[in-house]
Amino acid sequence: DIAFCSKMDNEPLVEFVPVAKQELVLIVPEGHPLDGKTSIDLKEALTYPHIVFSKRSGLRHVIDKLFEKCGGYPQIAYSMEDQGVAGLFSAGFGIAVVPRMPILSSLPVSIIEIATPSWERLFYMATLKNVYQAPVVTNFKNYVLEHAEI
């Protein structure tokens, strides 16, 4: 009845309503030349190999657009499903643009805020248009909208 996801283009039967924002950061291993920076123009990171999410990931589209704004695209060291990125990263195979998550603080990484280019990552509540929704579904949708972080 309801999904929480990235917005998909060309889905005329689905209503997407933004409900939360997510911050993206650049992570680099300790000792990396970018280690110690607190914020970065992402262009500075283009010369380093990156670990990226697979093209099936909703994040890949967002991150690709971010690099388009930089006027270039980094060399891809590895392309992985969402769960594999952290494993390759922690093994030192590259740097990565990832969502800011609590687990990052427990890894041997430097977390660098992306100052430029400007960007926004939204989460959406998705429902089918023109379909009967049980009262419990409607009540839940209303609850989510009342507590949305947008």
Image (spheres, helix red, strand yellow):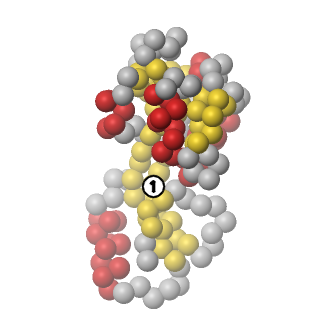
Task: Name above or below for residue 39 compared with residue 135.
Answer: above
Q: Image height check: is 78 above or below 139?
A: above
Q: Can residue 99 be seen here? A: yes
Name the residue: 59% across, 61% down. Answer: 8
Picture residue at 46% right of the left edge, 20% below the top: 29
In this rendering, is residue 74 above or below 24? above
Note whether residue 39 is visible.
no
Relative image position of residue 114 (x, y in whole percent): 49, 28
> What residue is shown with label 1?
123
On the rendered structure, is 53 left or right of 21?
A: right
Q: Residues within 10 Å of mark 1 (few under 14, many from 20)?
A: some
Residue 6, image x, y percentages = 52, 56
Q: Nearer the viewer, residue 131 or 82?
A: 82
Which quarter of the rendering shows the N terminus? Answer: bottom left
Image point 51% across, 23% down: which residue? 92
Q: Position of residue 123 (x, y in %)?
A: 45, 55
Q: Eyeballing the image, is 50 above or below 136? A: above
In the image, what residue type sits under mark 1? Answer: Phe
Q: Quadrant of residue 23?
A: top left
Quarter holding residue 116: top right
The secondary structure type at the circle numbered 1 is strand
In the image: residue 61, left or right of residue 33: right
Q: How far across and how far down the image is residue 28, in percent?
A: 48, 22
Please give the name of the residue rendered at 52% of the width and 11% of the height, measured from the top-left corner. Answer: 33
